[in-house]
Amino acid sequence: MQDLEGAIQTTILDKDGKVITELGGENREMISEQDVPQTLKDAVTSIEDKRFYTHIGIDPIRIAGSFVNNLKSSGARQGGSTITQQLIKLSVFSTKEVDQTYKRKAQEAVLALKIEREFSKEQILTYYLNKVYMSNNVYGFGTASEYYYGKPLNQLSLPQIALLAGMPQAPNSYNPYTNPDNAKYRRDIVLQVMNRDGKITEQELTEAENTPITDGLISHDNEVVADSNDALVFDSLISTVLEEVADKTGLDPYNDGLTIETTVDSGAQRHLYNVLNTRDYINYVNNELQAAAVLLDSQTGEVRAISGGRNQTQLLTFNRATKLNRSTGSTIKPIMDYGPAIEYLDYSTGHTFIDQPTKYSSGKDIYNWDRKYFGAMTMRRALYLSRNTTALQAFREVGNDNITAFLKKLDITVENDGKDYLVESNSINTPVSPLKLAAAFGAFSNYGNYSKPHVVTKITTRDGETFTFDGEQTKAMKDSTAYMITDILKDSFTKGFATDINIPGLPQAGKTGSSNYTEEQLAAMGETGKNIIPDSWMAGYTPNYVATVWVGYDDPYVKGHGVDATEQTYAKKIYYQLMSYISRNTKTADWVQPDSVEAANIEVGTIPLSLPGALTPASSISRELFVKGTIPNSYSTNFGKVIPAPTGVKASYDQLRKELTVNWDPYQVPAGSNEKPVFSLVIGSQELSVTDKTSAIFSNITEPHVTLSMKVTVGKDSSNTKEFELELFTEESSSESSSESESSSSSEQHTPGSSSDTSSSEPAPSQEPNSRPNTPNEDSSPNQHGQ
């Protein structure tokens, strides 16, 4: 008797085994047989068990029908259960779908026959009506009538009774507050079945179907849930747990008396709640602004903290963390554009993109956020500076098929016009829930291994049966792709748009994002000319954790609901508070470059990508990453080629006049050039430049030891600079002779075309200085990241 009247509580535990909350066996207002109106009896029996009043606890007709279905599906999983048997399952057995075996159904049948002998039909129906879960932590039809309509059952209208009668099959799915379309669909099915069974007329059916689903519903927006400190802190987590339990097992936590072990970090969950719902961390401009956030273990996909909204007053409301369908803006670019470019086209982080005026294939312009264009740039710079034109360029070059395949391995499906396919605007604008976005970024953190996000690790039923759930992990991309994207996204915290939330000592990578209004939308809102956006995002990760945050208004197209400049900083601030908290006591080692990745200097803007030439300035050199085996082997000549240096260089010194004369052989201009050779000579602060000559004279040379530097330029091509160490005279001797030697120094080890000559002429006594070779100086290119 007691089992028939009450539900057994389910206990939910955090990752450390501490109790988060208990579900079931509460918020119930019992009704008696006299409180059940005939319309409710008709509605429930029509939709759940039309022969309830004539069978003996089991229904042979339903059993026969379900038997055929079960043979086809290789198991007793469908149909056959009477209201009496459902009451048995709610009170004694598991409601898990896979437990509906022939043995279990036989046990249910025996108990159903026993109950039918001991209790009347009205008693059995009343027990059932008192026991079922009706969403929003409400049990039984009596409680539901008061909760949803604020009045007893005998005062409800036909469509209101039909709505309640349809809820027990899937209470949360048919919740009229959170899923009104589903609720109306189910209500109308109940009405149609009642009409078919002769319980209501055609006119009553039509009138009831035309009644709005919101008719008579009372608002709970301003009511605060009892014990809200804990209930609301963990509400988004509980809704995620309920969905996952139903998906994996079919068990009913509100009636089956389960112990559910989860992955949540209670401390992080409370901290996230406080960050979103107090002004202790962020001074929110108002209480209407909404937010959603997810924190995952980046190695396992385990949910550590989750919140589906701010300032909730009711339980199991819309969970934005798992259900939000708003544009991610530029946050999608690593996933949609540049990740696939590395994965399928072997692009390097230095691959050249052109940031320039660009149109979609439709002819519509695509703009950067600042309406500026920077020309040729590396993939690295294009991503951390979030250029839209280059993202579209990458999208086109990779192609829809490759991108779709890449997304599929990250469990992301993109719909346009209700169908699964991509359009060009998806390159910078794709709706993805915070939970799915976090899991995708987690694959970048984990060297390309995608971990499906999950919150339930173990379930123990009241009869001791256990179900354990290990994380599901698959290879989504090459480790080279993941590492190279991560290396770029690390720059967001040093050069990009997340420099203000960098956490010293913590290796992290991430991407900001925002969607935009069209000019027409701004005009319709009366907000023309304002710096507002619909959505603001931050997705970031460390080697241990990944977090995503969305900030915006539920209805972004209402005046005053655009996210302004101040509100646009909140997503980053929420991320900062969450990641700082979870990483505070953990020493986090940086990502290790895999063997599949190599590094090399490149000349920025070269097409095809080239290594720096000998004359490439440091400002045009960047240190970039490559998929192993793809480093280019050509050198840039954009800043000129290295041509042969002058030969036959000789120097003579007139001590009396303090003049140093430098001579060299006539220079042979490279074939095909019409330019005259220009010779540049430097001694100390003196610089001489002569055109198409074979000598030059330095005056006022008084030092006994000087260094002569010399090179030749023809057009834009230059030779290496050659240096000569010259001993002009000593204090003991007014002149000294020696054979001349020389050496050249190069700014690049790979410089082609350099030469080293020694004059064969014998110097005249007391006139030619002693030249000593200078040790070659091999100056490697500076190591730079990006621009």
Image: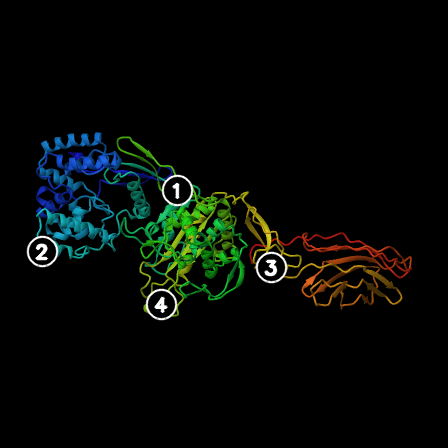
| Residue 241 position within the rendered picture, expressed as x and y whole percent measured from the top left | 31, 43
Tell me, yes or no, if residue 59 can be seen here. Answer: no
Q: Which mark is residue 302?
A: 1
From the viewer's perspective, is the residue at label 4 or at label 2 nearer?
Answer: 2
Q: Position of residue 439 (x, y in %)?
A: 40, 47
Alpha carbon of mark 4 to alpha carbon of mark 2: how far? 46 Å
The scheme the figure's colours follow is rainbow
Say left or right for 699 vs 197.
right
Residue in the image at 23% along x and 50% along y: 175
Front in this rendered view, residue 494 or 743: 743
Q: Is 1 placed left or right of 678 in the picture? A: left
Name the residue that disc number 2 marks.
203
Compute the Cα span from label 3 to label 4: 41 Å
Inter-mark Cα distance, 2 to 3: 80 Å
| Residue at screen point 22% across, 35% down | 70
Q: Amino acid at mark 1?
A: Glu
In what quadrant of the picture does the C terminus appear? bottom right
Q: Is residue 361 visible?
A: yes
State the image coordinates of residue 529 (x, y, percent, origin top left). 39, 70
Residue receiving disc 3: 620
Q: Mark 4 near mark 2, Cβ–Cβ under 8 Å?
A: no
User: Which of the two labelled residues, at mark 1 and mark 4, occupies the earlier sequence position?
Assistant: 1
Front in this rendered view, residue 735 or 358: 358
| 10 Å crowding of disc 4: few (<14), some (14-19), many (20+) | many
For marks 4 and 2, the one nearer the N-term is 2
Residue type beneath disc 2: Gln
Front in this rendered view, residue 522 or 694: 694
Q: Which mark is residue 522?
A: 4
Query: What secondary structure is marked by label 2?
Result: helix
Is 619 positioned to the left or the right of 316 in the image? right
Q: At label 3, which amino acid type do we have? A: Ser
